[in-house]
Amino acid sequence: MNEKQLIQACIDENRSAQRALYERFSAKMYFVCLRYARHELEAQDMLQDGFIKVFDNISKFKSNGSFEGWVRRIIVNTSLNYCRKSSFKNEQIGIEDYQDKVVDSKAVSNLSEQELLKLIQQLPDGYRMVFNLYVIEGYSHKEIGEMLNTTESTSRSQLAKARKWMQKVLTEQKITKNV
Amino acid sequence: MSDQINSFDEVFREKLSEHTISPPDFVWDKIESKRSFGHVVANKISINWRTFGTMLLLLLGGGSSAILFGGEEEQRMYFETVSNEDIETIFEDKAQNQDKNNLDINEGIAPYQTAIFNTVILSSKSTPTEQVHPEAHIPDIELMASINQAAFTRPEITIDKKLNILIQYIEGWESAKPITFNHYYTLNKMEKLGLIERSVVVSPIFSDIEYDYAQPVTKKSFWDRTSILLALTPQSITKIMSAEYNLSSSYLQHRKESEQTRMAYTFEAILHYELKNHKFIETGVNFTQIYEEMKFSGEKRFSNQYDFVEIPLLLGYEDRNSKFGYQVKGGFGFQIFNEYDGYIYKKYERKEPVQSSVERHYRIKGNPVKQLITRTHNLSQNQNPDEVLDLSKEEENPFRDNGVVNFHLAAGLTYYYSDKTTFVVTPYYRRNINSITKKSALFNERISYMGISFGTRINF
């Protein structure tokens, strides 16, 4: 069954097609949720709500774009809304002392995917959203401003603070160097 | 340093953008259980609301027509069978009852219950048998005159033209309620058609009834059944907003914080038509106005006005005693015309408020009544037009200009002031079934109204 047929079967509420579609995308989307969530339980709730939205709105999908991109966007938006509902705060962390230090990317590249994920999950909610959207999803600051209903400059500063926050954590783990 | 930042980001992007982790199996089970039959049906209805709404209205309309026209036909049939001869025979039969004391009621009176059904029976201390000759074949004119007199000199037993019930209670004569004969007539008719067996039909206990006075009832015309209801409903409104899959909910949160309803009311001009058995239908025009205050760029300004014109179709039930009564009604309405004036927030980024020494504009300033009825909804000098959507411009307005279906539910009290006038006080609930936003809008919005309707119903 190709993607188009699978989508049509899902529109017709065919349970086995929905299961197949879930199997096709769930692993990738679960990792997206994990990046936005603070822990696994939260990510599971995000994934669940996201896929319910996918199945509810699948008839609205216009086949001129990538279906995976469409699903991903729903999952990302669901995750953002979930973060905001639970406890969105623009946390101010004491990071000013680390302004002159830059994390060595080689040191970071030695970290495994799980370790990087853990690092992201430890970020405060506001930083985590902007970091994920900009660095991994590839949205521009203007787009992030629209998505989070904030300004472009706020998005920039949140990203800078997110990097600094990571730098602080990594320094504490002795993987930074002075420049 | 910039290169270092880029390579730092690149590590994350490369390692995490395509990484996968399988979720636990129970997540699918939860999805499956949450998307139950009811959920899927509700979702289908919300997607295909037009089709479902039309079907429901057709069903409601069709049902009402069937009751309306079917009922009249049935009643006409009853009246065709009533004649002076029938009425006379009742009295004749009563006289025979007095003489014999022991008449087989099932055999003797059954053919006349149609006449009894259409006859108002009133109690009196006098004995009609003294006035009616057992062998008389022509109605006694004096007797009929006294019947009329008795009927209209008994204030505690009123003829209720509005509710199609002639007598609710006759003291000590439970079995003389018209409804008894109505049931008996129906059963008898069914028996004649072979639908039920004779033994099932239980006749009213005629031996307990004294037919002292009787008065034939005239059929109510269309205009007798029709009245016009004029009502005003001040109400509070609640906006239920939800983001489409591609909109963040923070925008809606922001709108919720920035908009505050200052006044909402509905004026109704409704045609009320009585059906059989206390039921009624109502249709007409509802005009709703909502005024809301909007706060942005640090300013409060009374700027939004929504006007809706709706055609409701309601089915209801009403009952009352001599003066007070109650009614319950429900149904659907179609908004045929929506107009919007004012501004709501744009989805896009918000600029910092302009600091200015200019005095801020608040709504209640000067003459509040004049402010309330003003139709100008302009921005002030301090407010930035780029951060709002102008609702009066078709290309910016995210709301529909028609095609919204509403659900109505109301239950309240009536006061029967006179034959021509009834006052109605009804708590009223109304809610948009489908979203008031256009299909292209990034969010859905439904309005629910809760208010108390104060109305007067005037008979033609």
Image (cartoon, rainbow, N blue to C red):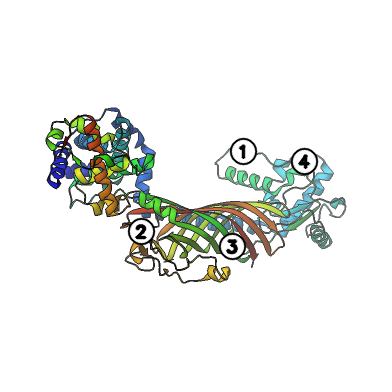
Q: Residue at x 27, y 53 (%)?
A: A153
Q: Earlier in the sequence, mark 4 or mark 3?
A: 4
The tag on residue B352 is: 2
Q: Earlier in the sequence, mark 4 or mark 2?
A: 4
Residue B445 point in image, percent of width and height: 40, 54
Q: Nearer the viewer, mark 1 or mark 3?
A: 3
Q: Earlier in the sequence, mark 1 or mark 3?
A: 1
Q: Earlier in the sequence, mark 4 or mark 1?
A: 4
Mark 1: secondary structure = helix
The tag on residue B198 is: 1
Residue type (three-letter) at the residue carrying disc 3: Leu
In the rendered image, residues at marks 4 and 1 fall on the same chain: yes
Residue A157 in view, yes or no: yes
Q: Earlier in the sequence, mark 1 or mark 2?
A: 1
Q: Is residue B385 left or right of residue B87?
A: left
Q: CA distance from mark 1 to mark 2?
A: 87 Å
**Residue at the disc numbered 4:** B103
Q: CA distance from mark 4 to mark 1?
A: 19 Å
Residue type (three-letter) at the residue carrying disc 1: Arg
Q: Nearer the viewer, mark 1 or mark 2?
A: 2
Residue B222 point in image, percent of width and height: 60, 64
